[in-house]
């Protein structure tokens, strides 16, 4: 029912723009407040739709998916969460899809964060992944299949120190369990015992620091998911083969979900983003129409 109403609402929104254009042509443009209302509806209505936008999986995303899916069962992945709630709309869908894939493939995940709220975002992503029936069938257990080591201050110093020993930076996990008492951490000394590093980043410290220290100094294999604003800064490292793949912004999240065959929040929010951009472009056209009509009258 909600899906049908949302589709009808979007159709009416589009048709009403014809009336807005007509008013503009006859010299009676709408108030700018109306534009804000249109943008709000364009952003909100797609969130209630079951439709999925057309998504083309780029080579950078496919390379990351291939690298993750080639890992054998019980491989150790260090997942670094370096973002906070304001960046969650772009990065959280990536994180949820990542955990679903990891749990379904029986991969062991070690979570940490260089941002204070990063480990909390990881917990939310894990909770969402555990609702998936296929993940529930695998029955991943905390401490055995995954662990959250929590936040550690110190930026890139933390990564550098982990190169000598993880325990030096994380003597206990987020639940205050001693490092040596956690089964999934047995035989994990430093990066040489980690098969893959996955970083979700919204800034500094983040992917740049993981490349400079974990990859360049300690030879880690790195993949990343970044906000759209940060992604252009990361592409040079990807082109230099210092990373195996990159998810950039909302489109990267949607591509990741499609490549994994797990449509989710990234695809839904990408549809919202597309419709919002479409409305803004149409109002730019309508605004320019009003401008040229006004200039023509003045010149006439």
Image (cartoon, helix red, strand yellow):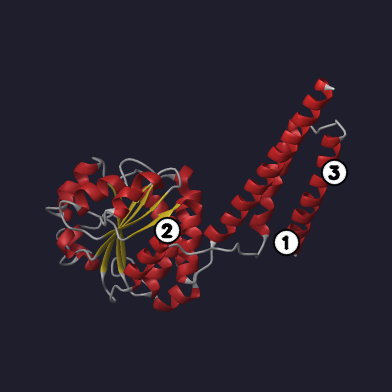
What is the secondary structure assignment of the residue under circle 3? Answer: helix
Position of the N terminus, as image quadrant, is bottom right
Query: Residue 148's image quarter?
Result: bottom left
Residue 236: x and y in percent read 32, 48
Nearer to us in this view, 163 or 288? 288
**Which residue position holds label 2?**
95
**Which residue position holds label 1?**
2
267 sits to left or right of 193: right
- Residues marked 3 and 2 touching at CB (< 8 Å): no
Please identify the residue farthest to the bottom as the structure is shown.
137
Disc with the residue nearer the chain's start (1 vs 3): 1
Query: Residue 194's image quarter?
Result: bottom left
30 sits to left or right of 66: right
- Say few, some or many: other residues with alpha carbon within 10 Å of mark 3 (under 14 / 14 to 19 / 20 or more): few
**Which residue position holds label 3?**
19
- Say few, some or many: other residues with alpha carbon within 10 Å of mark 1 (under 14 / 14 to 19 / 20 or more): few
What is the secondary structure assignment of the residue under circle 2? Answer: helix
Which residue appears at 67% of the width and 61% of the height?
Answer: 49
Please identify the residue farthest to the front as the structure is shown.
300
Q: Above or below — where is 298 with respect to 213?
A: above
Which residue appears at 23% of the width and 66% of the height?
Answer: 195
88 sits to left or right of 173: right
Nearer to us in this view, 31 or 92? 31
Which residue appears at 85% of the width and 31% of the height?
Answer: 28
Nearer to us in this view, 105 or 167? 105
Select label 1 or label 3 by which is in front: 3
Residue 227: x and y in percent read 44, 47
Residue 199: x and y in percent read 33, 54
Q: How many marks?
A: 3
- Say few, some or many: other residues with alpha carbon within 10 Å of mark 2 (under 14 / 14 to 19 / 20 or more): many
């Amino acid at each position: 029912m909600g899906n049908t109403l949302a589709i009808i609402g979007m159709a009416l929104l589009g048709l009403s723009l014809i009336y807005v254009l007509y008013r503009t042509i006859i010299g009676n443009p709408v108030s700018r407040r109306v534009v804000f209302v249109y943008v709000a509806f364009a952003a909100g209505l797609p969130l209630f739709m079951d439709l999925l936008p057309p998504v083309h999986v780029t080579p950078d995303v496919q390379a990351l998916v291939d690298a993750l899916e080639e890992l054998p069962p019980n491989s150790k992945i260090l997942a670094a969460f370096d973002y906070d709630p304001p960046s969650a709309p772009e990065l959280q869908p990536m994180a949820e899809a990542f955990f679903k894939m990891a749990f379904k493939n029986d991969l062991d995940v070690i979570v940490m964060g260089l941002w204070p709220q990063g480990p909390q975002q990881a917990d939310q992503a894990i909770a969402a992944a555990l609702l998936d029936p296929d993940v529930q069938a695998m029955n991943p257990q905390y401490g055995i299949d995954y662990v959250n080591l929590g936040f550690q201050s110190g930026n890139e110093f933390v990564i550098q120190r982990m190169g000598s020993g993880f325990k030096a930076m994380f003597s206990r996990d987020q639940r205050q369990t001693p490092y040596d008492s956690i089964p999934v951490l047995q035989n994990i000394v430093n990066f040489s015992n980690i098969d893959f590093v996955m970083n979700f980043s919204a800034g500094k410290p983040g992917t740049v620091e993981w490349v400079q220290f974990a990859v360049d100094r300690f030879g880690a294999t790195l993949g990343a998911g970044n906000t759209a604003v940060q992604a252009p800064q990361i592409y040079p490292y990807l082109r230099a083969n210092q990373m195996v793949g990159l998810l950039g912004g909302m489109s990267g999240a949607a591509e990741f979900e499609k490549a994994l065959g797990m449509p989710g929040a990234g695809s839904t929010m990408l549809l919202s983003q597309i419709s919002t951009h479409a409305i803004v472009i149409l109002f730019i056209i309508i605004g320019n129409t009003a401008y040229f009509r006004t200039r023509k009258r003045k010149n006439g």
